[in-house]
Amino acid sequence: QVQLVESGGGLVQAGGSLRLSCAASRRTFSMGWFRQAPRKERDLVANISWITGITAYADSVKGRFTISGDNAKNTVYLQMNSLKPEDTAVYYCAADLHRGSADYWGQGTQVTVSS
């Protein structure tokens, strides 16, 4: 089992920035962030492979969000810049991603962007 602890959500005005952090209790193969807005499905936002170092992003966040991490600390970050109201959602940290889902999930952290 892997426990994931998230931090960094909150309320920000449009155009602002937030940084999310997620610490895993042990090493994983990959980590990432999903988000779920009210009445919508949970979608992958960004992920990073600890094996290859490759990162990937949803089209809607490319150029605005950056995923990074410290494999030695089992920690992943999501730097979110130029935030938009449509970025408002509960953001979930995930580990060991596969086929658009993951084996382990954090509890979620609310991000609210006001217009």
Image (tube, grey):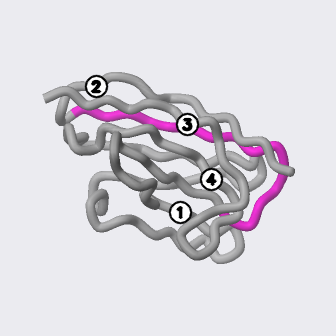
Above or below for 103 versus 38: below
Q: CA distance from mark 1 to mark 2?
A: 23 Å
Residue at disc 4, secondary structure: strand
Q: Is residue 105 left or right of residue 32?
A: right
Magenta stretch bounds? 16-30
Type of the residue with mark 2: Val
Task: Give the label, 2 or 3, closer to the camera.
Answer: 3
Q: Which label's residue is closer to the chain start, 1 or 4?
A: 1
Neighbour tally class for label 3: few under 14, some 14-19, many 20 plus, Cα within 10 Å: many
Dividing the image into 4 quarters, which one contains the C terminus? Answer: top left
Q: Which residue is mark 2?
A: 12
Q: CA distance from mark 1 to mark 3?
A: 16 Å
Q: Are marks 1 and 3 in contact (CB under 8 Å)?
A: no
Q: Which residue is mark 1?
A: 47
Q: Which residue is mark 4?
A: 94
Q: Which residue is mark 3?
A: 108
Q: CA distance from mark 1 to mark 4?
A: 9 Å
Q: CA distance from mark 4 to mark 3?
A: 10 Å
Residue at disc 3, secondary structure: loop
Q: How far across and how far down the image is residue 5, in percent?
A: 68, 35
Neighbour tally class for label 1: few under 14, some 14-19, many 20 plus, Cα within 10 Å: many
Residue located 74% across and 49% down the image = 74
Q: How far across and how far down the image is residue 105, in percent?
A: 66, 48
Above or below for 87 versus 6: below
Residue located 42% across and 47% down the image = 36
**Which residue is at the front of the view, 101 or 3?**
101
Q: CA distance from mark 2 to mark 3?
A: 17 Å
Q: Which label's residue is closer to the chain start, 1 or 2?
A: 2
Task: Give the label, 4 or 2, closer to the camera.
Answer: 4
Q: Is residue 60 left or right of residue 55?
A: left
Residue located 71% across and 41% down the image = 4
Q: Are marks 1 and 2 in contact (CB under 8 Å)?
A: no
